[in-house]
Structure formats: C-alpha cells, structure tokens
Amino acid sequence: MSTLAEQSTEAAVDWHIDTVDVDAYLARLGIERPAKPTARALRDLATAHVLAIPFENVDVLLEQHRGISLDVVQEKLVGKKRGGYCYEHAHLFAAAAERLGFRVRRIVARVQPRRPGPYTHMSLLVEAEGVWHLVDVGFGAGMLQPMPLVDGAVVDQAGWPHRLTHREGWWTLQKQQGDEWEDLHAFTPNPSSPIDYEVYHHYTSTHPRSPFTGQLVVMRLEPGLSRQLVGHELTVRRPDGTEEKTEVAPGELGEALRQLDVALTPEELAALLERY
C-alpha cells in the first residue's frame, strides 16, 4: 500500500504508549511475547485480544466512565479484567502493538454508512511485513483477525466471511449475509489525533441518541459463535445462519454477564440492575 506508506506518520503524536505494561497485557491475553512483529504475530495478538477481553458498555450505562486515557484503560481492561468499547480496546491494542514493534495508525470509521451511522468508531491500521492490515479488535462481535488492506480481500472471521472494498478513497468493511454483502463501516486511512477520540467518546458516552447510553450492550466472538446481549435480549448466532434469542430476566443478569466474561463487583451489578 504505497499510497498509505507515503502519508505522514503518527510519530509526532504522543499517545503515551509507555504507560502500557506490555507483559501484563500479554498475560491478560494468555499469550507469549512475540519474537518479531510478523504478520502471524499480529494475527495471534488480535485474535487473543478479542477472545480475552469482552466488548461492553457497563460504565457508560452507569454514567461512571472514567475516560479513555491509556492509564485508565489499562487499569480497567488489564488490572480489573473488565471489558470496554471501541476506544478502550483500540487504544490498548495500538499501544501494545507499537511497543512490540508494529507500525500503527489510529483511524475513525462511519458505522453503517448506508444509513448513515455516526463517524465515531475507532479502528486501527497496522503494518506487518510490509503489508497494512485493518485490525478491528473493538468492533464488538465483528472481527477476530486482521484483514490485509487490499481491495476485494475476503477473510473468514470466526466463520463469517468479511470483505474490504476500496472506492474513491474510502475503504468499506463488509460482512456476507446470504448472497449479499452488508456494509459494516467505512473509513479513510487518514490518521486521527487523541483529541478527536475525546470528542467521539464524549458523544458516544453521553448523547441520548448514542446506542450505548440507553441499554446494556455486551458482545463476544469466538470461532463459530457470536453472542450479543443487547438490552434484555441475548442472541446467539452461528455461521450456518441459525440463531437463538433468549430474554434475560433481572435475576439472571449476573450469571449471563459471567458467561459473557464480564466481571462486575456486587456494587456494580446492583447499580446496573437499577438501570436494567
């Protein structure tokens, strides 16, 4: 991707990556430190991150989110073994990846571009062995592994084919649904700055029209299985098209969250139940 490589890098931007304890992060993921920043190491790192750290908006829903500075994110996702949403996942992964020798560009995407959705989703472009990849560890039950930034590239994501297309400077991430391709989000390779994400996070965590301020959202992805708890409904999907929907009663919420790897204190669970 010469056009991307020729653009200015983020070297002049201080992302405070030294804040991250890489060994603690890798221990959270349950993997060893890679010897070199290879494409395989990038795939292993992204997959382990998605499998280990849940996507969840509990702190946003409880109006107690402490922000997306890297020290706060590390304390929450690594120290407390909690989950988070895109800004938290992507900030943490980007910092750790850079410390491990990968070249990283932080970008923003417009969700559901045909509607259109908000231009607020934080994602990453990461270079490994001379090839740029889309790495989207904070897209909920979406991507499990990197995708090469190549027009028409199709990658199986936990059993669901995903594709990248490029047109007039915009890249679009798509998911195959039957015979059709659904647009998930669209982005340009232009780098964002820390203040951009502060603005996006403020909207996403406070605006009444944000999908994360009015209902619980928890998502988990693993090979052959997607689980999403949105509001009171748990949906379990499989690549063969089958799905199961279950209503989660208040008395069942704690166990449902534990099954989704969301570890709350008794006080947090009690506060969540008041909003549930």
Image (tube, rainbow, N blue to C red):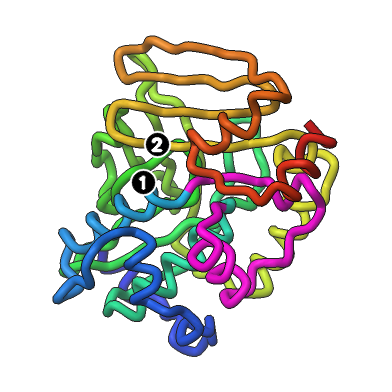
Vertical placement of 170 versus 152: above or below? below
Q: Are marks 2 and 1 in contact (CB under 8 Å)?
A: yes
Residue 123 percent across, percent down from the top left: 48, 56
Quadrant where the C terminus lies? top right
Q: CA distance from mark 2 to mark 1?
A: 7 Å
Quadrant where the N terminus lies? bottom left
Q: Amino acid at mark 2?
A: Leu
Vertical placement of 10 versus 61: above or below? below
Mark closest to the chain's N terminus, 2 or 1:
1
Q: Identify the image quadrant of residue 272.
A: top right
Which residue is at 30% across, 57% downward? 133
Residue 56 percent across, percent down from the top left: 59, 45
Label 1: which residue?
A: 51
Quick one: 141 or 175, which is closer to the camera?
141
Mark 2 falls on what kind of element?
strand
Q: What is the magenta range?
A: 54-83
Residue 129 percent across, percent down from the top left: 16, 69
Which residue is at 27% across, 67% downward? 127
Q: Is residue 32 magenta?
A: no
Q: Is residue 55 magenta?
A: yes
In the visual, does 255 lie left or right of 9?
Answer: right
In the visual, does 79 lie left or right of 147?
Answer: right
Residue 263 percent across, percent down from the top left: 56, 48
Mark 1 falls on what kind of element?
helix
Label 2: which residue?
A: 221
